[in-house]
Amino acid sequence: MTNDNPEQYDFVVLSNRLPVDRVVAADGTATWEHSPGGLVTALEPVMRAADGAWVGWAGQADLEFDPFYSDGIHIIPVTLTADEVENYYEGFSNDTLWPLYHDVISSPSYHREWWESYVLVNQRFADAAAASAAPGAVVWVQDYQLQLVPKMLRAARPDLTIGFFNHIPFPPYGIYSQLPWRKQIIEGLLGADVIGFQRVADAGNFARAVRRLMGYVTKTPLIEVPGEEPRTVLAKAFPISIDSSSFEELARRPDVQARAKEIREGLGNPKTIMLGVDRLDYTKGIGHRLKAYGELLSEGRLEVEDVTLVQVASPSRERVQAYMQLRDEIELTVGRINGDFATISHTAISYHHHGYPREEMVALYLAADVMLVTALRDGMNLVAKEYVASRFDETGVLVLSEFTGASDELKRALRINPHDIDGLKDAIVHAIEMPREQQAKRMRSMRKQVLRFDVSRWSVDFLTALRQSRVVPAVIEDDDDPLGELESTIDRIRRP
């Protein structure tokens, strides 16, 4: 419910991007369309029930928009200049933090002007949240682009309950310590009451960084933050998930199943279709996957007439140099393998450098006998869960990197070390040859996990922890308790 001030809200979410995209038609008219991402799916029911607000960037530089209302959510846009997009977003967020937090698979760049822009933009987000949050409101900050916001927000609004969720890995201290602004990031995050991570290991890495850099006492999962008003911060794993039932519903639709059959026919009806679905990112291990498949064809362990690899690599950060170089490398490798092994009627790799709507993705999941997730480091990897949720007939094999968060939960997948090319090749052959009975046993176990621990469960678990993390400040009247309202909202949307 809203506060008496119509511009203040009892539940506020902050993320780098808004849950809506601005779409400009051919005639120049612009409309806002909701993004299909998992975070939006997770929080939409909470936002609507709590009449909440979402603070974020609209995705285009130098455009200012007034707050507006869209499909049950109050939208509060934050403006970024072209220089800020270059320095805060493409620079510090995606060329410093992203590679650092993903085990330095690509070398991070450290530039002071990028850091200064990061601080400036984080302060702008914090200011927007402080202005839009009602007294005693709950504010949930999302992801690595906004790690300074919790401290900034607490300084401006100590009455707020603040949560933060890190959607990507948090690195071991030996890697994290390379960051010149390592203490500032830790101090920023410790402004939150609850800090969520994808994996238990990530939470442990964060606690070790706190001990090494700040000297604070940590008793898993609690961190004692000293000061004039000492605080206890909860830092633990809350593995994110997907809207599992919606994927199964799509998979059961006759038109989607017909499309899956068309896909198989279009590929020449091979005995086995393997599928990779990734953003074109160096963390995803696409090159390792292609190398393993190419060697299997070269060694004669697989025949191109029998096995086809479909690789969907959606565009990602195409203005960042490392990503431009990666695209060239992947496309050269695909071209070489196809040139060496394709026949007139059978292509070794069907490569697609663009995204697809959800219906088409589910059809691909149904068409694929083997799903290859070979990420070198991934916070979660929701594609693995989407594949499992779509396989309602309990067939199909998931080959899953142990360096993904999903591997902690999907223990019946064929788990692999993507750096071990020979081991990856053996896992691929094992997946192709696996009997249906064994496929069903493994898939049944994974589907039980994914359907039970869905994205609604994730949001409820986090918000429940947030609700329990603080006592309502004395300045808030008992009959105007936003935290109590949040608890009521959680109770209404919690699934039995």
Image: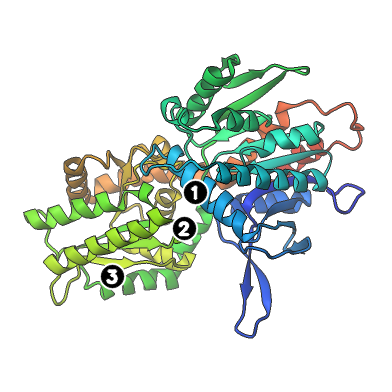
User: How many marks can you see?
Assistant: 3
The three-letter amino acid code for the residue at tag 2 is Arg
Give the labeled residue for mark 2. 317
Task: Place residue 377 in its image quadrant.
Answer: top left
Mark 3 burial class by Cα count in 10 Å: few <14, some 14-19, many 20+: some
How much space separates mark 2 and mark 3, taking CA atoms?
A: 31 Å
Q: Please state, as top left, top right, bottom left or bottom right, where the C terminus lies in the image.
A: top right
**Residue 78: % across, % down:** 71, 55
Q: Residues within 10 Å of mark 2 (few under 14, many from 20)?
A: some
Which residue is depicted at the point 36% across and 38% down?
A: 403
Q: Are marks 1 and 2 in contact (CB under 8 Å)?
A: yes
Q: What's under tag 1, amino acid-wise?
A: Asn
Q: Which mark is residue 184?
A: none
Q: Is residue 465 left or right of residue 144?
A: right
Residue at figure coordinates x 39%, y 66% from the top left: 363
**The label number, if any, that marks residue 94 in the structure image:** 1
Q: Which residue is mark 3?
A: 264
Question: In the picture provided, is 492 more to the left or to the right than 205?
Answer: right
Depth check: give the residue in front, 272 or 75: 75
Cα–Cα gap, marks 3 and 1 = 37 Å
